[in-house]
Image (cartoon, rainbow, N blue to C red):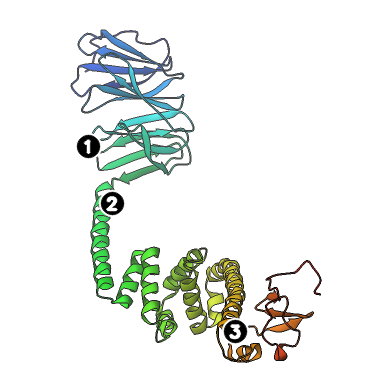
């Protein structure tokens, strides 16, 4: 039979939790009077009182390794206390309702808590941060405990459910380590392929590694390599036909980003051209996400084409200047009309309101009849753009 050896009035209100230290030297009691008291196990003498919580204490646990005590309170906080001087050394905030249970993990470096908000939280003591939040119960989580080896966590709530949680930290670390090793190996292969100018193999690896900058570099090398033979587009088309849907979406997503910068727009437009010329439009429209990507590419593409049109128009001034310099310093009887016929303009010169228009710019002082234009006299004034004065 059991009988009470020692008894003491410990608190002013009901006691919610009693916990014993790992070495059996101290007993901690938590009460609705917002305090935790530490008692000597030998004679129930008071060792100290922990004050700081604003509501009742629901749970308290000793660390398995250090002389500290963790407490859970209805004020939505966890606190870590020093047993030596009964001072608070850490406060953990994050629960949306009262904290009902707290446990130390086997290493003593982390805490796990459960609360009235139905959440289970994992805390790192050193950083004071919540590392993970688990939402598995629809009501208060009253019960929480760990297996002796620390690999499993058990929780029970007011929703009448018991949940078992397994520690997968080691598996995740191993998987992360394997992924890093594989990534290093793939990056080495990519560097080797680029060094030996094996661009097709390098493109596949760069896409698999999801490295947009490396993909852009490889595509640029492919286009520049085939620039003299004008087969860069054909090479891209050959790749585009063999790309699966996920790879095609990935490439077009890269093009959308590249196209926002004028420096990379040329490669982006070549890739888009290779895709739309080899894959039917109806098929592209049926793929999820691709129409939206094209809708984002279009505005920047129009802006780049407008910029190129402006450059082409401005280049006619250079042609006209070079022609004028030739007519001044050469004895050739070549006239303006012969130069016009020999030159290959995207937009041919034309007379507009008595002025000759070359590439979108007006040349004031030239004769209206383009076919009969002769060399300009030394008295003629040539200006570019609209003239504010009427032609005399």
In this rendering, position of residue 150 left or right of residue 328: left
Q: Nearer the viewer, residue 375 or 111?
A: 375
Give the residue pinned by disc 3: 327
Q: Nearer the viewer, mark 2 or mark 3?
A: 3
x, y percent for residue 246: 43, 70
Residue 240, by quadrant, is bottom left
Give the residue pinned by disc 2: 172
x, y percent for residue 256: 51, 66
Question: Residue 148 bears which disc, if any?
Answer: 1
Q: Nearer the viewer, residue 285 or 53?
A: 285
Q: Nearer the viewer, mark 3 or mark 1?
A: 3
Disc 3/disc 1 C-alpha distance (Å): 98 Å
In this rendering, position of residue 76 left or right of residue 196: right
In this rendering, position of residue 347 left or right of residue 173: right
x, y percent for residue 305: 59, 73
SS assignment at label 1: loop
Where 169 falls versus 342 (above or below)? above
Disc 2/disc 1 C-alpha distance (Å): 22 Å
């Amino acid at each position: 039979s059991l009988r009470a050896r020692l008894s003491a009035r410990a608190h002013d209100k009901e006691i919610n939790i009693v916990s014993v230290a790992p070495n059996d030297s101290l007993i901690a009691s938590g009460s609705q009077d917002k305090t935790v008291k530490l008692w000597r196990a030998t004679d129930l003498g008071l060792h100290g009182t922990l004050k700081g919580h604003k509501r009742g204490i629901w749970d308290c646990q000793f660390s398995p390794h250090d002389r500290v005590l963790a407490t859970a309170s209805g004020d939505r906080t966890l606190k870590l206390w020093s047993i030596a001087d009964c001072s608070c050394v850490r406060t953990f905030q994050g629960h949306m309702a009262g904290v009902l249970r707290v446990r130390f993990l086997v290493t003593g470096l982390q805490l796990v808590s459960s609360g009235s908000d139905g959440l289970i939280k994992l805390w790192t003591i050193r950083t004071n941060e919540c590392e993970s939040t688990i939402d598995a119960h629809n009501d208060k989580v009253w019960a929480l405990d760990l297996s002796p080896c620390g690999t499993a966590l058990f929780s029970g709530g007011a929703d009448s459910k018991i949940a078992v949680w397994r520690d997968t930290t080691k598996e995740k670390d191993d998987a992360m380590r394997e992924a890093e090793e594989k990534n290093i190996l793939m990056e080495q292969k990519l560097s080797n392929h680029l060094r030996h100018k094996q661009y097709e193999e390098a493109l596949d690896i760069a896409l698999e590694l999801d490295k947009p900058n490396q993909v852009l570099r490889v595509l640029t090398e492919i286009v520049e390599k085939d620039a003299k033979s004008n087969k860069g587009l054909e090479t891209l088309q050959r790749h585009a036909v063999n790309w699966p849907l996920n790879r095609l979406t990935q490439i077009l997503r890269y093009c959308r980003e590249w196209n926002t910068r004028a420096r990379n727009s040329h490669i982006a437009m070549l890739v888009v051209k290779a895709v739309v010329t080899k894959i039917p439009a109806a098929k592209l429209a049926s793929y999820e996400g691709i129409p939206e990507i094209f809708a984002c590419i279009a505005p920047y593409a129009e802006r780049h084409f407008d910029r190129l049109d402006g450059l082409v128009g401005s280049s006619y001034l250079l042609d006209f200047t070079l022609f004028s310099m030739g007519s001044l310093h050469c004895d050739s009887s070549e006239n303006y009309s012969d130069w016009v016929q020999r030159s290959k303009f995207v937009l041919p010169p034309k007379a507009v309101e008595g002025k000759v228009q070359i590439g979108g710019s007006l040349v004031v002082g030239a004769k209206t009849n383009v076919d009969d234009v002769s060399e300009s006299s030394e008295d003629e004034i040539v200006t570019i753009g609209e003239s504010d004065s009427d032609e005399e």
